[in-house]
Image (tube, rainbow, N blue to C red):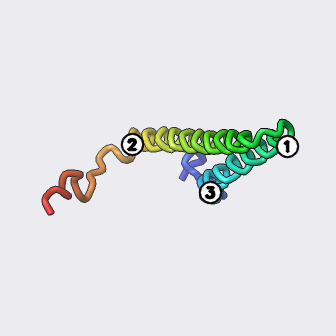
Amino acid sequence: MNEEQKEPKFKKVIKGADQASLGISIVVAIVIGVLIGYGLVRLTGYKWMLALGIIWGVGAAILNIVKAYKKQKKELDELKNDPKYKNYKPKYDEDDDDKY
């Protein structure tokens, strides 16, 4: 292997941490939304502000999911165009499940 093909030592660890961070970011986004909503309730006295904070948190969590999906799709599209996998034939065709 030459220098260009050598993978970093901790590549798998970093990739695993990146994938685990999605779940953590969902929880953190919702918790931050709840805390903002609670703070707004304390500040304004309107109880519906808590629901608004929760909605913001859930919206932020959904945005994190969309960003992670787009990043993963981009990586898989780059892998699909890799010359190393150009001649790959799947073991089963996608239409094979209709036969059973």
Q: How far is the residue under mark 3 from the one under mark 2?
A: 24 Å
Query: Which residue is pictured at 51% across the width and 44% down the height?
Result: 72
The reply to whether the C-beta atoms of the residues labelled 3 and 1 are less than 8 Å apart is no
Q: How far is the residue under mark 2 from the one under mark 1?
A: 52 Å
Query: Dot 1: few (<14), some (14–19), or many (≥20) neighbours within 10 Å?
Result: few
On the image, the x and y values in percent for residue 5 come to 54, 48
Q: Residue 19 appears in which quarter of the rendering?
A: bottom right
Q: Residue 77 appears in which quarter of the rendering?
A: top left
Residue assigned mark 1: 42
Disc 3 on helix, strand or loop? helix
On the image, the x and y values in percent for residue 4 come to 57, 44
The reply to whether the C-beta atoms of the residues labelled 3 and 2 are less than 8 Å apart is no
Query: Dot 2: few (<14), some (14–19), or many (≥20) neighbours within 10 Å?
Result: few
Sooner in the amino-acid sequence: mark 3 or mark 1:
3
Query: Which residue is pictured at 64% across the width and 59% down the height?
Result: 13
Amino acid of disc 2: Lys
Amino acid of disc 1: Arg
Q: In the image shown, does 100 or 75 lie closer to the viewer?
A: 100
On the image, the x and y values in percent for residue 44 come to 83, 36
Sooner in the amino-acid sequence: mark 3 or mark 2:
3
Amino acid of disc 3: Ala
Q: In the image shown, does 16 or 27 lie closer to the viewer?
A: 27
Q: Is residue 96 left or right of residue 81?
A: left
The single residue placed furthest to the top in the displayed view is: 44
